[in-house]
Image: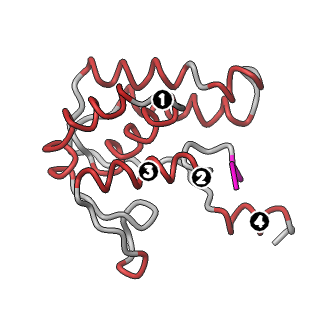
Amino acid sequence: MGWWSATIMGGDSPLDYLGVICDRMGAPFDYDRGEGLHGYHFSRNDLEKNMDAIVKMIEKEKWEQSVYWQVLGVMIMASGAKAGQTLKNRIIREAKSDPWMTEDGPKSERAHHINDFIKAMKSHRAGRVTRLTDEGLFQALAKIEGR
């Protein structure tokens, strides 16, 4: 399907990568359970315990590394996980090279969401949960239809 929103998690790729990372951690998928991140349920501890393996997995990825790093950043902020300065810098550097944003320019809707993401990542502290603007497929369709 592609992308339905310029938000960080507004497309198939970030949701697929969220699934890959959660599978790696053994995090369950269950929309009926409520909360969670797009149906995945993981804790700060789950993410911190698996962080080194997740980073190594992303570093080996050949496609859309920028998106993978952004997804990891969303997961860190959504769970309040600890992220050292080196990891935060890597996530921010990858976000700044987001292909969609660089194609559309610094005043694009994607750039707005990337800049909000970078600002949130820079100020993230362990134990603090941050939720970014998110727009699911059905929300985007309703917006198009004027609902």
Answer yes or no: do the residues labelled 2 and 1 have beta carbons within 8 Å? no
Q: In the figure, is residue 24 to the left or right of 77? A: left
Q: Which residue is mark 1?
A: 65
**Numbered tag placed on residue 12 in the rendering:** 2
Pick whichever of labels 2 and 1 is earlier in the sequence: 2
Pick whichever of labels 1 and 3 is earlier in the sequence: 1
| Residues rendered magenta in the picture | 1-5
Quarter of the picture containing the N terminus is bottom right
Near-viewer residue (113 or 30) = 30
**Numbered tag placed on residue 141 in the rendering:** 4
Label 4 neighbourhood size at 10 Å, few (<14), some (14-19), many (20+)?
some
Quarter of the picture containing the C terminus is bottom right
Query: At which x and y percent is residue 53?
Result: 21, 36
Mark 3–mark 2 distance (CA, rounded to whole Å): 19 Å
Question: Is residue 45 covered in magenta?
Answer: no
Pick whichever of labels 4 and 2 is earlier in the sequence: 2
Q: Amino acid at mark 1?
A: Gln
Task: Name the dominant secondary structure of the magenta segment.
Answer: loop
Q: In the figure, is residue 123 to the left or right of 116? A: left
**Numbered tag placed on residue 131 in the rendering:** 3
4 vs 2, front mark: 2
1 vs 4, front mark: 1
Answer yes or no: do the residues labelled 1 and 4 have beta carbons within 8 Å? no
Mark 4–mark 3 distance (CA, rounded to whole Å): 22 Å
Mark 4–mark 2 distance (CA, rounded to whole Å): 15 Å
Q: In the figure, is residue 92 to the left or right of 10? A: left
